[in-house]
Image (tube, rainbow, N blue to C red):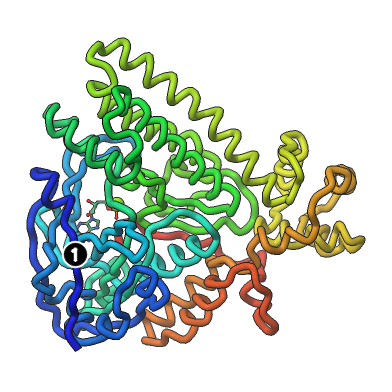
Amino acid sequence: MTLSLRFEHSYAEQLHGLYVPWQAQDWPAPELLLLNTPLAQSLGLDAQALQSPEGVAMLAGHAFPDTARPIALAYAGHQFGGFSPQLGDGRALLLGEIIDPSGARHDLHLKGSGRTPFARGGDGRAVLGPVLREYLISEAMAQLGVPTTRALAACTTGDRVLRQFGLEPGAVLARTASSHLRIGTFQFIAARGDHQKLRALLDYAIARHDPDLAGDPDAALKFLSRVTDRQVRLVAQWMGLGFIHGVMNTDNTTISGETIDYGPCAFMDRYAPETVFSSIDQQGRYAYRNQPGIILWNIARLAEAILPLIDADESRAIARATEVIEAGRARYRDAWLEVFTRKLALPAPDAPLIEEMHALWAGQEVDFTSFFRALPHALAGAPEGLRALFRAPGQALEDWLPRYRAAAPDVAALAARNPLYIPRNHLVEDALAAASDDGDLQPFRKLLDRVQAPFTEVAGAERYASPAPRDAPSVVTFCGT
Ligand code: AMP
Ligand code: MG
C-alpha cells in the first residue's frame, strides 16, 4: 500500500516569512492509536493507506511523503493579556493542504511532532493524555455542531516524555482545520511593521475565508466584521454548551471562526459563571462568563494589527474599527439569544425568559447539561426530575415553568437540540488516566462513542449522562502539556 497524498501548499507558496521549513522526527516506535475514518473519508483520503506504515509514519511525524512540505508556522500573540511578538509552532508542523471532494481546503497539521525553531524553552512534545483530550473534545464539538478543528488521528511515538507528574507516553495528534490563520498571525506581521506583507496576508486570508471580499475597496474593514461575526457566534455556541476554552489567547483565536487548541478546556458541570479549569489562569481571565468580553478584546487586537489597511488615516481607521467592535457587542447578544432560543425551542427570542432562566440557576449548582434534557419531562407534567437538579428548588422555578410553557416551545424538538452526552470532566479524567497509566483505551473508546452521538439516548449508558457526584473533587486542567 503506498500513500499517494495530493497536497497543495498555498500557505508556503504565498506567505514567505511566516514559517520555517522543518523536518520529521525519528521516533523509536510510531504507532497509530486512533484514526478518524469518517473524517478521512469526508476529506477524500484513503483510510487504508493512512493505516499503512507510510501512513502511520506521516501521521506520527516520523517520515513524510514527498508531496508533504512540512513547515512550522510563525505567529505572535497576546497570552493572558501580555504580548509576545514571537510564538509560533514550537511543537507542531503544517504538512500541506488537502482539497476535499467538495473543493474545500483543509490544513493537515501535526501537534507534538518535535522541537522547531519556535520551541523556545519547550521540549517540542505532546503526551498521550492531552492528545486524547483534544481528540475527544474536538470530536464532541463537531458533533454538537460547533465549528472546530478536527482530529484525524492520534499516534504514540514509542518513547516517554517528562511531565509534571512523571514520565508519560509521547504522542502526536494529526488535526485538520479550514486554516491555521490566527489573530496572532496578523500580529506577527504587524509587530514587524511590514505593510506589504500585511496586505499579502490579508489577501490570502480573504481568498481562503471570505473570497467574495476580494477586490473590495473596503476589504479590511469588512474582513474585520466577518471575523467578528464568526467569533461571536462561536463563543455564543460555547456558552450554550457550558464550554470553557481555557486559553483564549490571540494565538488561539482563528480567522475562520473554528475552535482551536484544546488545552485546558472543559465543559462546566454545575452552573457557576465564574468557573475556570485552567491551572495557570489564577485571575479567572478566561472564566465562562468572561469569554464574550475576551473575544471582543481579541478582535480589537486584530483591528489594531490591520489598522493601516482599514484606512491610511489612522484616526479614521480607529473610528471605523471601533464601530465594528461596538457592533460586535450587539451581535454577540443576538447570537447568545439565538443559541438559547434554539435550546429552549422557542418560536421567537424571549430575552426576559432566557435571562430569568440564568437567574434561576444562580447558587443552585444546577447541572447545566441535564437542565435542558429535563425540560420536556417538566413540560409534560413531570417536573420532579427538573426540581431535583436544584440544590434548593424554590418558587422562582415554579414561576418560571408556566412562563416557559406559555411561550409555546416545540417540546418535540428539545431532545434533538440539547445533548445528553458531553465529555464530562470526571469521565474524561478516568478515560485519559486508563489510557496513559494502564495503556487501556477501552474507557476512552466508550466515551468517544457516546459523545459522537450526543443527542441519542442509549440504554445502559446512564453513567455517561450523569453529573459527577456532588462531593467529587473539582477538575483542574493543565496548559501547554
Ligand atoms: P498553546 O498553549 O498550546 O497554545 O501554546 C502556546 C505556545 O507555546 C505555542 O507557540 C506553542 O507552540 C508553544 N508550546 C507549547 N508547548 C510546547 C512544547 N512542549 N514545546 C515547544 N513549544 C510549546
Ligand atoms: Mg496555541
Q: Residue at x 26, y 74 (%)?
A: 171
Q: Is residue 473 left or right of residue 286?
A: right
Q: Residue at x 27, y 17 (%)?
A: 311
Residue nearest the observer in this picture, 100 or 202: 100
Find residue 402 and report its horizontal and vertical position in percent. 90, 46
Q: Is residue 145 left or right of residue 318?
A: right
Residue nearest the observer in this picture, 382 or 359: 382
Q: In the figure, residue 251 lies in which quadrant? A: top left
Residue nearest the observer in this picture, 457 or 369: 457
Q: Is residue 240 above or below residue 159?
A: above
Residue type marked 1: Phe
Q: Is residue 48 left or right of residue 428?
A: left
Q: Is residue 279 above or below residue 57?
A: above
Q: Is residue 121 visible?
A: no
The residue identified by callout 1 is 7
Q: In the figure, residue 190 lies in which quadrant? A: top left
Q: Quadrant of ligand 1?
A: bottom left
> Which image quadrant: the N terminus?
bottom left
Furthest residue toward right? 381
Residue nearest the observer in this picture, 228 or 92: 228
> Circle 1 — which element?
loop
Please tell me how crowded label 1 is: few (under 14), some (14-19), or many (20+) other residues with Cα within 10 Å.
some
Find residue 133 and report its horizontal and vertical position in percent. 41, 68
> Which image quadrant: the C terminus?
bottom left
Q: Residue at x 85, y 59 (%)?
A: 378
Q: Residue at x 31, y 16 (%)?
A: 317
Find residue 268 and report its horizontal and vertical position in percent. 57, 56
User: Is the distance from the Cβ of mark 1 to the nearest ligand 1 atom less than 8 Å?
Assistant: no
